[in-house]
Image: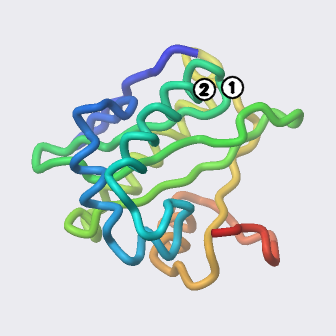
Amino acid sequence: MQPVTLHTERLELSAPAVSDVDEIFAACQDPDIQRYTTVPSPYHREDAEGFIVKTERWWADGAEATWVMHHPDGLAGVVGLHRLGNSRGGGEIGFWMAPEFRGRGLLREAARAVIEWGFSERGGLGLTRIEWRAVVGNVASARTAQALGFRYEGLLRGALLH
Protein backbone atom coordinates (compact mmCIF):
# COMPACT_ATOMS: atom_id res chain seq x y z
CA MET A 1 0.00 0.00 0.00
CA GLN A 2 1.29 3.44 -0.87
CA PRO A 3 1.30 6.12 1.86
CA VAL A 4 -1.66 8.49 1.71
CA THR A 5 -1.62 12.13 2.79
CA LEU A 6 -4.75 13.42 4.53
CA HIS A 7 -5.71 17.04 5.19
CA THR A 8 -7.93 18.55 7.85
CA GLU A 9 -8.77 22.15 8.60
CA ARG A 10 -5.58 22.65 10.63
CA LEU A 11 -3.37 19.63 9.92
CA GLU A 12 -1.57 17.72 7.23
CA LEU A 13 -1.26 14.01 8.00
CA SER A 14 1.60 12.35 6.16
CA ALA A 15 3.76 9.26 6.47
CA PRO A 16 6.60 9.77 8.96
CA ALA A 17 9.83 10.88 7.28
CA VAL A 18 13.47 11.26 8.26
CA SER A 19 12.84 15.01 8.59
CA ASP A 20 10.44 14.23 11.49
CA VAL A 21 13.00 12.37 13.64
CA ASP A 22 14.02 15.31 15.85
CA GLU A 23 10.43 16.29 16.66
CA ILE A 24 9.34 12.69 17.27
CA PHE A 25 12.33 12.18 19.55
CA ALA A 26 11.56 15.39 21.48
CA ALA A 27 7.85 14.59 21.88
CA CYS A 28 8.54 11.04 23.06
CA GLN A 29 10.52 12.36 26.03
CA ASP A 30 7.12 13.16 27.55
CA PRO A 31 6.46 10.85 30.53
CA ASP A 32 2.79 10.42 29.57
CA ILE A 33 3.66 9.24 26.06
CA GLN A 34 6.08 6.73 27.57
CA ARG A 35 3.56 5.66 30.22
CA TYR A 36 0.47 5.30 28.04
CA THR A 37 1.81 4.10 24.69
CA THR A 38 4.11 1.38 23.44
CA VAL A 39 7.11 3.66 22.81
CA PRO A 40 10.27 2.50 24.58
CA SER A 41 11.22 4.05 27.89
CA PRO A 42 13.72 5.61 27.95
CA TYR A 43 13.23 6.83 24.38
CA HIS A 44 16.40 7.39 22.36
CA ARG A 45 17.01 9.13 19.05
CA GLU A 46 17.68 5.69 17.54
CA ASP A 47 14.11 4.72 18.52
CA ALA A 48 12.75 7.63 16.47
CA GLU A 49 14.97 6.68 13.53
CA GLY A 50 13.81 3.06 13.79
CA PHE A 51 10.18 4.19 13.93
CA ILE A 52 10.59 5.87 10.54
CA VAL A 53 12.03 2.68 9.01
CA LYS A 54 9.26 0.54 10.56
CA THR A 55 6.45 2.79 9.36
CA GLU A 56 7.82 2.68 5.80
CA ARG A 57 7.72 -1.12 5.95
CA TRP A 58 4.23 -1.15 7.55
CA TRP A 59 2.85 1.03 4.76
CA ALA A 60 4.53 -1.12 2.09
CA ASP A 61 3.24 -4.36 3.64
CA GLY A 62 -0.27 -2.99 4.23
CA ALA A 63 0.04 -3.95 7.89
CA GLU A 64 -0.37 -0.45 9.32
CA ALA A 65 -1.07 3.07 8.15
CA THR A 66 0.74 5.63 10.31
CA TRP A 67 0.77 9.40 9.97
CA VAL A 68 2.50 12.31 11.65
CA MET A 69 0.27 15.30 12.32
CA HIS A 70 1.92 18.40 10.89
CA HIS A 71 0.60 21.69 12.27
CA PRO A 72 1.97 25.12 11.27
CA ASP A 73 3.61 25.24 14.73
CA GLY A 74 5.35 21.86 14.36
CA LEU A 75 4.79 18.13 14.65
CA ALA A 76 1.68 17.73 16.81
CA GLY A 77 1.59 13.96 17.17
CA VAL A 78 1.18 10.57 15.55
CA VAL A 79 -1.98 8.67 14.62
CA GLY A 80 -2.29 5.30 12.95
CA LEU A 81 -4.43 2.33 12.05
CA HIS A 82 -2.88 -0.93 13.23
CA ARG A 83 -3.61 -4.66 13.02
CA LEU A 84 -5.01 -4.18 9.52
CA GLY A 85 -4.64 -7.74 8.32
CA ASN A 86 -7.17 -9.30 10.67
CA SER A 87 -9.76 -11.61 9.16
CA ARG A 88 -12.77 -9.57 10.30
CA GLY A 89 -12.00 -6.52 8.16
CA GLY A 90 -11.10 -4.33 11.10
CA GLY A 91 -8.23 -2.40 12.55
CA GLU A 92 -7.20 -0.52 15.66
CA ILE A 93 -6.55 3.20 15.97
CA GLY A 94 -3.72 4.49 18.12
CA PHE A 95 -2.36 7.96 18.73
CA TRP A 96 -0.24 10.28 20.85
CA MET A 97 0.06 14.05 21.03
CA ALA A 98 3.08 16.21 21.83
CA PRO A 99 2.37 17.99 25.15
CA GLU A 100 2.32 21.50 23.68
CA PHE A 101 -0.47 20.54 21.25
CA ARG A 102 -2.85 18.94 23.74
CA GLY A 103 -6.19 20.50 24.57
CA ARG A 104 -6.75 22.13 21.17
CA GLY A 105 -8.97 19.48 19.57
CA LEU A 106 -6.25 18.59 17.06
CA LEU A 107 -6.19 14.91 17.96
CA ARG A 108 -9.94 14.59 17.49
CA GLU A 109 -9.62 16.34 14.12
CA ALA A 110 -6.81 14.04 12.95
CA ALA A 111 -8.38 10.85 14.28
CA ARG A 112 -11.70 11.68 12.63
CA ALA A 113 -9.94 12.03 9.25
CA VAL A 114 -8.11 8.73 9.74
CA ILE A 115 -11.30 6.94 10.79
CA GLU A 116 -13.20 8.29 7.78
CA TRP A 117 -10.37 7.15 5.49
CA GLY A 118 -10.26 3.74 7.18
CA PHE A 119 -13.98 3.14 6.65
CA SER A 120 -14.09 4.65 3.15
CA GLU A 121 -14.64 2.20 0.32
CA ARG A 122 -13.41 4.81 -2.19
CA GLY A 123 -9.73 5.51 -1.76
CA GLY A 124 -9.62 4.17 1.80
CA LEU A 125 -9.40 0.74 3.35
CA GLY A 126 -13.09 -0.18 3.49
CA LEU A 127 -12.78 -1.39 7.08
CA THR A 128 -15.89 -2.67 8.85
CA ARG A 129 -14.68 -2.03 12.39
CA ILE A 130 -12.10 0.19 14.07
CA GLU A 131 -11.19 -0.49 17.69
CA TRP A 132 -9.43 1.72 20.21
CA ARG A 133 -7.45 0.48 23.22
CA ALA A 134 -5.77 2.37 26.02
CA VAL A 135 -3.76 1.72 29.13
CA VAL A 136 -5.87 2.00 32.28
CA GLY A 137 -5.60 5.52 33.64
CA ASN A 138 -5.22 7.24 30.28
CA VAL A 139 -8.24 9.46 30.87
CA ALA A 140 -7.43 12.03 28.17
CA SER A 141 -7.27 9.32 25.50
CA ALA A 142 -10.55 7.85 26.73
CA ARG A 143 -12.23 11.27 26.46
CA THR A 144 -10.99 11.63 22.89
CA ALA A 145 -12.21 8.15 21.95
CA GLN A 146 -15.63 8.79 23.48
CA ALA A 147 -15.91 12.11 21.63
CA LEU A 148 -15.19 10.18 18.41
CA GLY A 149 -18.03 7.75 19.13
CA PHE A 150 -16.10 4.79 20.54
CA ARG A 151 -17.86 2.77 23.23
CA TYR A 152 -16.39 0.83 26.12
CA GLU A 153 -16.62 -2.92 25.48
CA GLY A 154 -14.38 -4.48 28.07
CA LEU A 155 -11.10 -4.73 29.92
CA LEU A 156 -8.16 -6.70 28.50
CA ARG A 157 -6.06 -7.62 31.51
CA GLY A 158 -2.35 -7.86 30.78
CA ALA A 159 -2.88 -7.15 27.08
CA LEU A 160 -0.21 -4.46 26.73
CA LEU A 161 3.34 -5.33 27.60
CA HIS A 162 5.76 -2.44 27.96
Q: Which residue is drawn at 58% across and 18% down?
A: 60
Could you tell me if the residues under marks 1 and 2 are in contact, i.e. CB atoms within 8 Å? Answer: yes
Up-down relation of residue 78 to residue 61 (above or below): below
- Quarter where residue 136 is shown: bottom right
**Percent position (x, y) of residue 85?**
77, 31
Q: Position of residue 43 (x, y in %)?
A: 40, 62
Measuring from the top left, give residue 41's x and y in whole percent.
47, 69
Disc marking residue 120: 2
When asked about the image quadrant of residue 123, the answer is top right
| Towards the viewer: 6 or 36 | 36
In percent of the image, x 53 and y 30: which residue is there?
A: 117
Mark 1 lies on a secondary structure that is loop
Name the amino acid, label 2. Ser
Residue farthest along the left direction in this orientation: 73
**The N terminus sits in image quarter:** top right
- Please tell me how crowded label 1 is: few (under 14), some (14-19), or many (20+) other residues with Cα within 10 Å: some
Disc 2 is placed on an element classified as loop
Q: Earlier in the sequence, mark 1 or mark 2?
A: 2
Q: Closest to the observer: 21 or 67? A: 21
Give the distance between the C-alpha atoms of the residues marked 1 and 2, in whole angstroms: 5 Å
The residue pinned by badge 1 equals: 126
From the top left corner, tell me how far across and down residue 113 is, in percent: 44, 39
